[in-house]
Image (cartoon, rainbow, N blue to C red):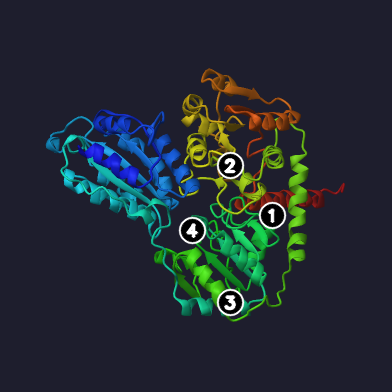
């Protein structure tokens, strides 16, 4: 067999079912090998390489198998980078194969020639080039091992065209079975450190768990839920950490941080005397730009992470341990069980947490009941939450959808069911990512929340959805602008708007129809629920175009923005009072 055929045989050994990609001149040998393997491996043709990588990213997040994407040389290798960077930045295991010009043409200025390893170096965890056919099996095994072990990420393999076509004698076609899924090669934190961590938790009166994306990647939701129940500890999550606990659970307080954080959950962090960070980078959003823990706050910080570089990186820790979260928390719970430990007295109870949350949900309900047109994003999210099954999968774009989904859409089961790109927040993610989600969870309903800015970048993937007859529901948040950027210009740049408004009217539903997908345009809020329920009952894709209020009209739960608006309000009130005081007529 040639190297391309050997590669396909190796992918079969690793249980690969889907490859997302776009054809190119230098990849023909691989496509010919995939043609022979159809029925065992399905190739999903995207409309550009960035979209293919987004598909593989979402597939990996939801299937717990490394996502596979491929791209040709030149433009393909350059186009794939945004999707690769997003996956790598979110620690999502992915393997990207890029074909290249023949090795014999190296240095000759051949068309599409570029140093692919250097090009993708900043966007990947590991990279290698197959310079001889005999190298292929070992490199592929290393790629799967690199992608799935430790802190997950993207492994990159360069496949020169001539090497792909060259015969390989007696290839070692076998897989490391543990690397078919992730995390592979789990490690447990040291027991002595876990015992100290348990003692610190028991000594606290107001502990809070903050679970990040690493908790979901590790599959540690059962252990986190048991920890919360056993020791009566509130569980907050980052956006990527949604799924670390069922958000309808008594001890769940939802998302914290600067984007999509619930105010009462953020407040709990400021009052905590013990913060336990699990699988989170503890970045500026999580710490509200370094204000949590607050200077002078008497708090014990505990941290568990698979990546030692994250330990104590942004917040000084009292006890920090390196290890897989699922394995390490299971060991901590076993220690507690062996010591017959029961829940200590706490200053927070489930009833107190419910009381803290009540005003937030009252405000959400008020905005969700608003009958304005354009429609409030809260109404869209509320309708979606009320009328979707518990096993729905939501894939959301950055922008308007992120904070409203994070704060308002409560997961009704543990595990990954919300997918939002948080590493780089690249527009154009959700529409192609729903394709990967649909293949990862074929028996669950997939809903994509798409911004109109993102739609302009990846709308052609409607053709992919239509050709595959995937029963995906797409909801377009249509506010006629790059609303997030426009809000920044409103708050920080004196309303000097440039390059943020879309001119002319776009018939998005008509565009969907042109691609062969049923399009629905909402003109009245009362049409939302029937449109959503009918779409979810359909066996075909449905595109729902919803005119929504922009960030300027309906400010999302972004803490920094609300602080600026609050200061503006105080300043305006003070000016009014000063004017009235100076006017003898008042």
* Alpha-carbon span between mark 2 and mark 4: 20 Å
* Alpha-carbon span between mark 3 and mark 1: 26 Å
- Residue 132 pos. (x, y %): 16, 44
Secondary structure beneath label 4: helix
Q: Is residue 28 above or below residue 261?
A: above
**Which residue is label 4 attached to?**
218
Q: Is residue 560 left or right of residue 347?
A: left
Q: Specify the label residue 336 is tagged with.
A: 3
**Which residue is label 1 attached to?**
248
* Alpha-carbon span between mark 1 and mark 2: 17 Å
Residue depicted at x 48% and y 46%: 63
Q: Nearer the viewer, residue 472 or 126?
A: 472
- Residue 118 pos. (x, y %): 26, 46
* Alpha-carbon span between mark 2 and mark 3: 36 Å
**Which residue is label 2 attached to?**
394
Q: Is residue 24 above or below residue 573?
A: above
- Residue 108 pos. (x, y %): 13, 34
Which one is in front in this view, the residue at disc 3 or the one at disc 1?
3
Secondary structure beneath label 3: helix
Residue 500 in sight here: no
Which one is in front in this view, the residue at disc 2 or the one at disc 4?
4
């Amino acid at each position: 067999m040639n190297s391309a055929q050997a590669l396909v045989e190796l992918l079969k050994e690793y249980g690969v079912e889907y490859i997302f990609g776009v054809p190119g001149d230098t990849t023909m040998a691989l496509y010919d090998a995939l043609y022979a393997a159809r029925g065992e491996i399905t190739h999903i043709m995207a409309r550009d390489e960035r979209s293919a990588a987004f598909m593989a990213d979402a597939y990996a997040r939801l299937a717990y198998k490394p996502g596979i994407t491929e791209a040709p040389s030149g433009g393909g290798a350059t186009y794939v980078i945004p999707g690769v960077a997003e996956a790598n930045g979110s620690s999502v295991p992915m393997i990207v194969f890029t074909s290249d010009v023949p090795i014999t043409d190296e240095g000759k200025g051949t068309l599409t020639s570029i140093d692919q390893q250097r090009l993708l170096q900043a966007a990947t965890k590991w990279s290698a080039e197959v310079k001889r056919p005999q190298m292929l099996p070992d490199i592929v095994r290393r790629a799967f091992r690199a992608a799935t072990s430790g802190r997950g990420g993207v492994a990159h393999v360069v496949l020169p065209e001539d090497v792909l076509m060259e015969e390989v004698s007696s290839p070692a076609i076998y897989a490391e079975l543990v690397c078919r899924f992730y995390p592979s090669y789990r490690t447990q934190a040291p027991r002595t450190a876990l015992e100290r961590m348990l003692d610190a938790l028991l000594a606290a009166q107001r502990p809070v768990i903050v679970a990040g994306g690493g908790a979901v990647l590790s599959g540690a939701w059962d252990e986190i839920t048991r920890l919360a129940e056993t020791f009566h500890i509130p569980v907050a999550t980052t956006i990527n950490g949604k799924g670390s606990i069922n958000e309808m659970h008594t001890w769940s307080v939802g998302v914290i941080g600067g984007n999509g954080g619930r105010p009462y959950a953020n407040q709990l962090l400021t009052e905590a005397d013990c913060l336990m960070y699990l699988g989170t980078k503890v970045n500026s959003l999580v710490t509200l730009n370094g204000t949590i823990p607050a200077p002078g706050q008497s708090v014990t910080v505990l941290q568990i992470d698979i990546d030692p570089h994250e330990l104590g990186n942004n917040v000084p820790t009292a006890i920090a341990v390196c290890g897989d979260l699922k394995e390490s928390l299971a060991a901590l719970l076993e220690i507690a069980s062996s010591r017959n430990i029961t829940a200590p007295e706490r200053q927070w109870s489930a009833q107190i947490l419910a009381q803290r949350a009540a005003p937030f949900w009252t405000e959400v309900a008020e905005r969700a009941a608003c009958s304005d047109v354009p429609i409030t994003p809260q109404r869209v999210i509320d309708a979606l939450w009320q009328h979707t099954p518990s096993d729905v999968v939501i894939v959301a774009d950055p922008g308007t959808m992120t904070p409203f989904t994070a704060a308002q859409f409560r997961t009704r089961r543990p595990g990954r069911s919300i997918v939002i790109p948080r590493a780089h927040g690249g527009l154009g993610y959700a529409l192609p990512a729903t394709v990967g989600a649909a293949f990862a969870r074929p028996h669950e309903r997939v809903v994509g929340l798409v911004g109109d800015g993102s739609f302009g970048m990846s709308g052609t993937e409607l053709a992919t959805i239509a050709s595959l007859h995937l029963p995906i529901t797409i909801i377009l948040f249509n506010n006629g602008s790059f609303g997030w950027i426009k809000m920044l210009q409103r708050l920080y740049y004196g309303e000097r708007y440039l390059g943020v408004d879309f001119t002319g009217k776009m018939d998005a539903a008509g565009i969907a129809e042109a691609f062969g997908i049923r399009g629905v345009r909402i003109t009245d809020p009362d049409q939302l629920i029937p449109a959503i329920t009918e779409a979810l009952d359909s066996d075909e894709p449905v595109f729902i175009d919803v005119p929504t209020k922009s960030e300027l009209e309906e400010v999302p739960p972004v803490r920094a923005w609300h602080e600026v608006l609050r200061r503006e309000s105080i300043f305006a009130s003070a000016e009014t009072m000063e004017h009235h005081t100076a006017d003898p007529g008042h």
